[in-house]
Each structure stands twice: as C-alpha cells, then as structure tokens.
Amino acid sequence: MTQQAPPTALTPEVQAMVGVSGDIVESWGLVDGEYMRRFTQALMDPDPRYWDDEFAKSTRYGEIVTPPIMVSYLASRIRPDQGDPITAAFEENPESDGIGSVERPGELPPVPTNLVRVLNAGNEIEVYAYPSIGDNIFFQNRYSEIRERLGRDGTPFLIITRETRFWNQNDVTLCITRASTIRR
C-alpha cells in the first residue's frame, strides 16, 4: 500500500507572493523630541543618548539618537485628518483582534490560502543606523519568505515572513524588521 502525500499549502499562487512589495510610505511627521520623550518613557529606557545633548555629543553618534525600534512605531502614526484603522476594524467587526483586519498604509495583499488561523512565529530587527531628530522616515513591506511545514497531525501549514525596510530622507537604511506568522 502506497502512502499518499498530504496536500500542499504552498501552491504556485502562494509561492508567487514571495518578493511582492507594498507601496513606499512616508511616515507622518518627522522624528521629533516630544514623540521621542514619550516613547523612551513608555519603554522605561533612561539611556542619556536619547535626551542629554552633552552626553550624546560624547558618544560615537555625536548627537541625540532615538531607540532603534522607534522607527517601526513611527510607521503606525496616523495623520490627524485620517480615520483610525483600528477603530474602523472594530466598527466593521466587533470580534476583530485589532491586528489581522486592520488596513494600514503600505499593506501587502493577502496571501491566497484557505489557512485562516494566524499565530505569531517571531519578530526580529536588524539595526543599521539610528534615526536623528528631524529625520523623515520611509518604509516598505515585502513578503521575503514563505515556507511550508507539516504539523504533528500531518497537515501542512505556512510560515509567512514579512520584511519591512525603514530609511530616512537621505536613503540611509535605518533598520529592517521581520515578522513571521504561522497560517494553519
């Protein structure tokens, strides 16, 4: 008796999504001291590189810098004249998780799969440069990898990795984040 291979979730349509990029998005607002002050307080990070001019000048950066992950939060800032996408998601679906059904600028098209359960599979950040006060931040999402694995029960699932590059007005890459999700 020959054993039949399980059906694949990594269809040609799913594989074609690798490399697909979203629009280039300019974050709303420049990197400013007040936003950074509130951000570092929320992180509870007292590092003087983020607030003390004299100390920051003595570092290898020569100026006040922001926490590296701050740029990824700048990407979610909304202009005052725009509606809040999280509120809109809850109005459309009161059962919304506030993540999956939220439409944000530069969002990628959905991966064409019938696997609808979503689990976080991890996040990472590669830091190349710290943003400076006054920087204008840009970002772009893309699907960098889609892999298939088999669960313990033999059914296939996907691991989808979305990569986001952040850069400033001088085209200096600040960081690249990768967020992986499991689709079952």
Image (tube, grey):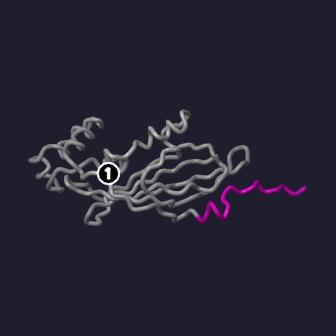
In the image as oriented, which residue stretches furthest toward the front?
Answer: 81
Q: Position of residue 166 (x, y in %)?
A: 35, 58
Is the residue marked by circle 1 packed among few (<14), some (14-19), or many (20+) residues within 10 Å? many
Pick the residue in front: 77 or 45. Answer: 77
In the image as oriented, which residue stretches furthest toward the right?
Answer: 1
Pick the residue in front: 110 or 38. Answer: 110
Pick the residue in front: 64 or 58. Answer: 64
> The residue under label 1 is which amino acid type?
Val
Q: Position of residue 149 (x, y in %)?
A: 65, 53
Pick the residue in front: 65 or 92. Answer: 92
Quick check: 1 above or below 83? below
Q: Secondary structure at mark 1?
A: helix
Which secondary structure dominates the residues rendered in magenta? loop
Q: Position of residue 6 (x, y in %)?
A: 76, 54
Residue at image position (44%, 50%) is 104
For the record, the magenta segment spans 1-16
Quarter of the image with the N terminus in it: bottom right
Residue behind mark 1: 71
Q: Position of residue 102 (x, y in %)?
A: 48, 45
Residue at image position (39%, 44%) is 83
Residue 10 magenta-highlighted: yes
Residue 56 magenta-highlighted: no
Quick check: 37 above or below 164? above
Quarter-of-image position of residue 27:
bottom left
**Does residue 126 appear to the left or right of 145 in the view shown?**
left
